[in-house]
Amino acid sequence: MATELDGFKFEQRHGKDRVRVTRVWRRKDGNHFMVEWNVCISLLSDCLNAYVRDDNSDIVATDTMKNTVYVKAKECSEQLSAENFAILLAKHFTSVYKQVSTAIIRIAEKPWERVTIDGQLHTHGFRLGSERHTTEVILTKSGALTLRSGIEGLSVLKTTMSGFEGFIRDKYTALPDTNERMLATEVSASWSYSYKSVSSIPQNPLHFTEKYQDVKKVVVNTFFGHPKEGIYSASVQSTLFQIAKAVLNRFPDISSVQLKMPNLHFLPVNISSVDNTIVKFNDDVYSPTDEPHGSIEATLSRFWSKM
């Protein structure tokens, strides 16, 4: 919160970061379901006296915030999405404490996946995947809602159907044109929903979990194309735009999507030794490196979207 103080502009917030919690749901049919969440809480609240008068009477203790995460997780008797849990926490902090005007809740969900044994899903066995499901909820005491979700660490690679040609050339340019290269990236995507209040969100407690899976599928399918023919990528920039456009075309309740797609290089290997032994690259042997790498990011929004 911003306040004028002794001729200065003073802004403050406080919260609790990296509150890790796991919730297991055990169904009567023997199947178990679980999530592992890393929760970060930030509160905008009227506690100026703690800063200027040594008076802590308006502070919500960060230890209380941590305990609230555990208690609210316990109270969730049915499965729910990370987004719904974040909204639940935000509603608690903005309604219980008169000092709190806005709650900001960020959650990163670890990708635990059910194990398949001999073609059957295990009732209680899980393995850790790779990419993470993220969300950020901003809720004001008046009920105004901002809701974002995302994917972090989605690693994808294709060994052909990618090139890079026709770029600016000058005296520092050493990169040759090519219409045949490997394309690899680690996608970070975040998208904003158009819901402006808690009452406007779908009632299904797993709606946003399902939407996350659907968005991830669109990202992956657009990157790779048809399983046999694939789809040609003229640049990471072109592929990024096609992914962003596909997400907005597929999901009308998403108002904008931001993508970060570093170009993780696989460099062709050519070796020429002093005795004239030559190993010539033939689209087969590469040297993988992620340092340095190209950095490409962009945001695509609907015209009516307020970023």
Image (tube, rainbow, N blue to C red):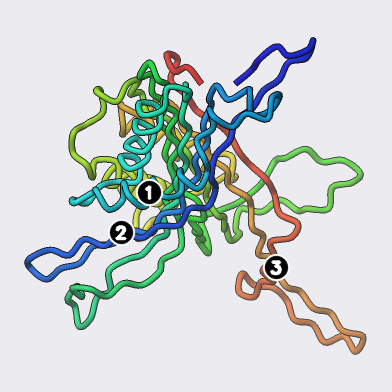
Q: Position of residue 153 (x, y in %)?
A: 52, 55
**Which callout, 3 or 2, points at the residue further toward the start of the chain?**
2
Which of label 2 and label 1 is nearer to you? 2
In primary-sequence order, the first of circles 2 and 1 is 2
Q: Amino acid at mark 3?
A: Pro
Q: Which residue is mark 3?
A: 268
Going 35% across and 40% down the picture, which residue do you hit? Answer: 83
Q: Around disc 1, counting alpha carbons within 10 Å, would you say few (fewer than 14), some (14 to 19), or many (20 or more)? A: some
Label 2 – label 1 distance at C-alpha: 23 Å
**Image quadrant of residue 84?**
top left
Disc 3: CA contacts within 10 A as few (<14), some (14-19) or many (>=20):
some
Mark 3 secondary-structure assignment: strand
Q: Secondary structure at mark 1?
A: helix
Callout 1, which amino acid?
Lys
Q: Which residue is mark 2?
A: 23
Q: Which residue is mark 1?
A: 216
